[in-house]
Amino acid sequence: MKLASAFFSKLRWLFHNPVFQKTPLLVAWRALIWEGAKFFKWEIPFVFDSTFAVRLQPGEGVSRLTFYFGNSEPDLFAFYDSFLQKGMVAVDVGANIGLHTLFMAKRVAPGGRVLAFEPSPKNFSRLKEHVEKNCADNVHIFPLAVGDCAGTGFFYENANDSSRSHFSNKGSGLVVEIIRLDDICRSEGVQRIDFLKLDVEGFEMRALEGAEPLFFAGSCAVLQIELDPNNLARQGSQENKVASWLIDRGYRFVVWDSSAQKFKPARVDNGCSYNSFFVSPSFRI
């Protein structure tokens, strides 16, 4: 009964996806291929963003969505495509296997660069492979976590879905190195970040605290941060705490208006979205 319920729930999710509605036969065919690859534990070679050769692994949520629909978060990737410009500096904290990183790197070139951070050894290996295979020379990758203080921490690596790996609060797991974003920007000569993506499965507050000098100075122009209530709660944080921290430092909560191609002011008391945007005091909207 549970299997049947899960199957029909997945079908409903698929049928309601805009990409499926536009190209149902293509998505259905890819879904069949995916299930076969998952059964036989085969990796799937894929051309991402019409440019990049990547390896997708069955079982991974990010890989599955990318194979089905072309990318895992259509609205967010559409924002990247509109907002990112040549010469910008972008930072990808929680880079996973590098799909966001590569997409950003293509749009800030030439003249721009991307700093990408991924603490999971499994994910970092594929991030490194994807960056090197695709000759993304304007990307600098770091096998590091970003936190509030330099040191080490325990990391839980999800064997079934690498996108769900996170810091362990049980005092056990893989030992990973932690760096403050402010420190690494100083060592890399980065004085201003045009765009910062922060997606670290609940560790967002700690990462922000390690970048406090950047935010006090307004040196990060635009921040996109994942605010997942469950992940934040696991790390002893919550959405309004993160939002208040940023607002106390002069940042404004905004939403991206895709039709007007610009940010619009928003009210935090109306609730933050899963992918929330904040802009610096000096950023014109």
Image (cartoon, rainbow, N blue to C red):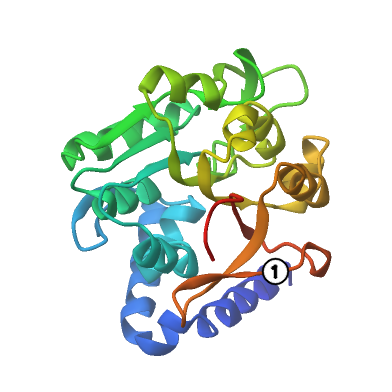
As drawn, 281 above or below 34: above
Left/right placement of residue 235 relative to residue 33 reads right
Left/right placement of residue 7 relative to residue 31 reads right
* In front of the other: 117 or 221: 221
The residue under label 1 is: 266
- Answer whether residue 156 is visible to the viewer in this image: no
Residue type of the residue flagged with mark 1: Ala
Is disc 1 placed on a helix, strand or loop? Answer: loop
Relative image position of residue 26 (x, y in whole percent): 31, 80
User: Which residue is located at x 71 percent, y 45 percent?
Assistant: 246
User: Which residue is located at x 54 percent, y 66 percent?
Assistant: 285
As drawn, 172 above or below 136: above
Relative image position of residue 202 (x, y in whole percent): 69, 41
Judge the density around disc 1: few (<14), some (14-19), many (≥20) Cα neighbours within 10 Å. Answer: some
Q: In which quarter of the image is the N terminus?
A: bottom right
Relative image position of residue 245 (x, y in whole percent): 76, 42
- Image quadrant assignment for residue 152: top right
- Answer whether residue 253 is visible to the viewer in this image: yes
Relative image position of residue 19 (x, y in whole percent): 41, 80
* In front of the other: 251 or 225: 251
Left/right placement of residue 101 relative to residue 239 reads left
- Image quadrant assignment for residue 48: bottom left
As drawn, 70 above or below 157: below
- Image quadrant assignment for residue 171: top right
User: Which residue is located at x 44 percent, y 66 percent?
Assistant: 79
